Amino acid sequence: MGFRRWIVCGGALELNPDPVVPTSGVKKGQDGGVKGMIKRRLQIDEKRKSNTQLNTAGLSSVGRFGSRESLSIPVSAANSLDLSADQTTIIRPVHSSILGEKYCFQVINSENIHCFGCTSAAERDRWIEDLRRAAHPNKDNCERTENSLSLWVNEAKDLPPKKRYYCEIHLDGTLYARTSSRAVGKSAPRSNHSGDGGSGASGAGHGGGGVGGCQLFWGEFFELDNLPPVTQITLHLFRDEDPKKKRYSRDDSIMHPLGSVALVLADIKGRAYQEKWYPIIPYKPPGTSTAKDQIGPQALLRVKAKFQNLKVLPIERYKEFAEHVTVDYVGMCSSLEPLLNVREREELAGALVHVLQSIGKAKEFLIDLGSAEVERLGENEALIFRENTLATKAIDEYMKLVGQKYLIDTLGDFIVRLYNGSESCEVDPQKCSASDLPINQRHLKETCGEVVKRITDMHDSFPAELNEIFSSWVSNCEERGQTDIGHRLISSSLFLRFLCPAILSPSLFGLTQAYPEPSTLRTLTLSAKVIQNLANFTLFGEKEEYMFFMNEFLEQHWEPMRGFLQRVSNPEIEIAMARFDGYVDLPLRLAVLHNLLVDIISPMKQDTIDSLHPLPLILNQITEFHGQDAQRIPVSSGYGVPKPLYVPPRELSKYTPLHNSMQQLPVDSKTSQAKERQRNQVKRALSVPNRRNQHQVVRKQTSNEDLPTQCQDEKQFLTISSPDNVKIKRPKPVPWIEKDEQNELRQRTNQEEEQTSIDRHAQELATLRLGVEKVSERELEAENRLEDFIALSQKQNAQLQAEVQELRNLLAVREEQLASTTFRLGVIEEEREEDERKLNVAVAAVERLNVLEEQIAGLLKDVHQLNSVNGDGMKKAYINS
């Protein structure tokens, strides 16, 4: 990392000892170099501070020109900071628009402020986390609140023409970010804005204006995390300096905001974006400039924003939830996906990717989703990663997470060159002249050739995680005999979802902040089309005849593209690859996923909620720690209380071994011993000798006790052994023969009962089998119908997708035609104004010519009269002579 200059902040001045060559023509000894630059900056800041009365705490002291120099400290200097002594220390990232450098972060304590620069977003996040743990070692075990702001600054209307403007985003008076400087467009007729913003305030006080204002488009996105408690969000509109003016002759009015927009915090809280037109309240500093420098009462600013303050519990509260997500993410996704809309799928996929990345299961998650996508689509491989499924959104988010450095190393310089260049790549004959067409075609080939070389020349910043995912996909497809689908998975994910969208919209992938100009946007669009066709190994068709000349370029680069796809999916590649070294805040991401699932599941029907068990119950257990007012998922009574592992029977004490059930029955004292002996003889086995019961007290029998007679024994025998209570007199056999007959009788009875039971069960089983066969036939018929319906639906879906894509292409063409027409109208308007000016000059000249003609006519008349008088005089003189 190169050495970076130090920043002036917190009242302390820290300078880089290396001299800086002045570029503005300042002579030596006249405050040149770094010292003069800082002195002039402080003077400008003091003037601006006194004029605007804005709180310049934090980074606002950098000033307007802070984005033009390197103002961060090398990150290695952060090791020398003592953060344990000051509990009020704040560590947060700094937006690139403030310092003009990416991946910086800020350390604020009670004494001063330091800014540090890193080489990547992952390195910055890791440093921020390490410093936060140094300041708060027990961070994960404490409850905290995380504030974040996501904001789109889209466009403005009715601004003074022929100027450049930018916006600054202030939170509680502190500058956090600023937009790029953009010039206004041409005049547009005045329209009613009350329907655009969704608020009556947008149209209030805007009447009476018959003159149209000018439009200005930014289209810039700002995501600010780790914010302190915020009470006020304000956007200040500034007029940028004229670069043609000399540095010391610039207008002081650029130090004052032209107007401001205050966002009501309560209106933008929540998960959903709120978009509307806001009236710009003019700012009039005392004793200032003329009316031409001020905005009118009809000026509007279109903003889309959302603010979230999320309560994060100690990590132990999310333990069961994290285990459930880790073990059953496949089942959870398959159950939830049919119930979600596109926005919810995108949010859920992003939250799951961050959670599983922190746990270490993100790769398995993506591999499973890719395999499921292949099984779902079957032979319709053209639709892989082209639908708004959880798999598509998850691979999008994962590639942005682990592939940011690779994307910057591959496309960063290329995008910067296109933004700064002026070469045209317009190859549509309807949009450019015939003389420029060959030159533009050559420019497009050179541009696409540079992109292909940057991509196919694989370097060490390619994510190793993507290589492992791609190799697993290819291996799974080869096992199924679908090798081509494996490469389709790679090209669809890496190019269709990552590289080509980054080329088409670089500002959404962190490659740049500003939205491209129309000519640059056209070059990016055509380049993305060529690269996508190259990755799909398809040529341009009749729909884009003007691109036929690129088919030869595509065929020439097919082999390098095939080699690249094989290398990125080769698990044994020798090229060293980079691994994700960033940090994911697991408690924060679990809190985000918990809130998201609660918001998604709560409005569902009760049957649907019950089918997701036990997820709703786990979510509600976490919600209990958020207070009584927190939103909960309605759970049925059967699922509301966890089931115990062991349910004891009723009146368990009556059935314990301490109570013999026979003691609860009345016993005849005279026959108790005989019955007991009989019972003991039935229980014991014949092969075991008769033993005395050790648990019973044996009493001595005296001669006066009545012994059981033969009749009593016979009756007792007949009563016990005969189930039909039929008394049959027979000679009493010997004891062991009597027992054998009794056992045989019981065996025969048991066999008859078993046979009857078997016959009955066999009949019931036959009936059940018949019913199962009928149900199976119905299920088979329903399955066939479902397959036919799915095939028809997929076919119709493919047709609809093709129609949608065609309509999108047509819309893009119409938008380009509209932009071209708007530009031409602007040119025509300028020409009309110039012609009108010339006409006025010509009319004035004609009027002056008429006056001159009248004067000449008068002079000629006078000359004629003089000639007449002279002629008469000469005649008289001649006559007299």
Image: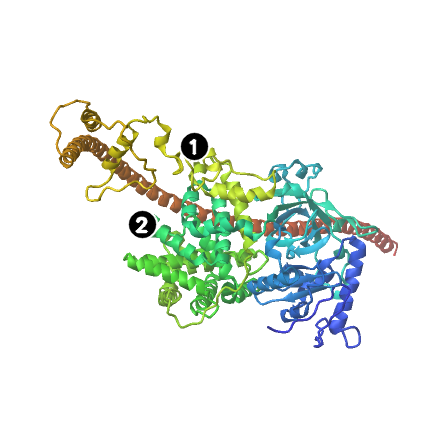
603 or 134, nearer to the observer: 134
Q: Distance of mark 1 from mark 2, alpha carbons? A: 60 Å
In the shown orientation, is residue 662 left or right of residue 593?
left
Q: Quick check: marks 1 and 2 in contact, CB under 8 Å?
A: no
Question: Dot 2 surroundings within 10 Å: few (below 14), some, or many (20 or more)?
Answer: few
Q: Residue furthest top?
A: 726
Residue 804 falls in image quadrant: top left
Amino acid type of the residue tagged 1 in the rendering? Glu
Question: Residue 388, image x and y in percent?
Answer: 44, 47
Q: Residue furthest left?
A: 731
Question: Residue 764, image x and y in percent?
Answer: 21, 31
Image position of 530 with respect to 717: above or below: below
**Pointer 1 or 2: first along the chain:** 2
Identify the residue at horizontal 14%, vertical 23% (top origin). Answer: 728
In the shown orientation, is residue 554 left or right of residue 33?
left
Question: Residue 425, image x and y in percent?
Answer: 49, 61
> In which quadrant will I find the C terminus?
bottom right
Q: Nearer the viewer, mark 1 or mark 2?
A: 1
Q: Which residue is mark 2?
A: 378
In the shown orientation, is residue 493 left or right of residue 314?
left
> In which quadrant will I find the N terminus?
bottom right
Q: Element under label 2?
A: loop
Amino acid type of the residue tagged 2 in the rendering? Gly
Can residue 546 be seen? no
Q: Which residue is mark 1?
A: 651
Question: Residue 756, image x and y in percent?
Answer: 18, 30
Can residue 478 be seen? yes
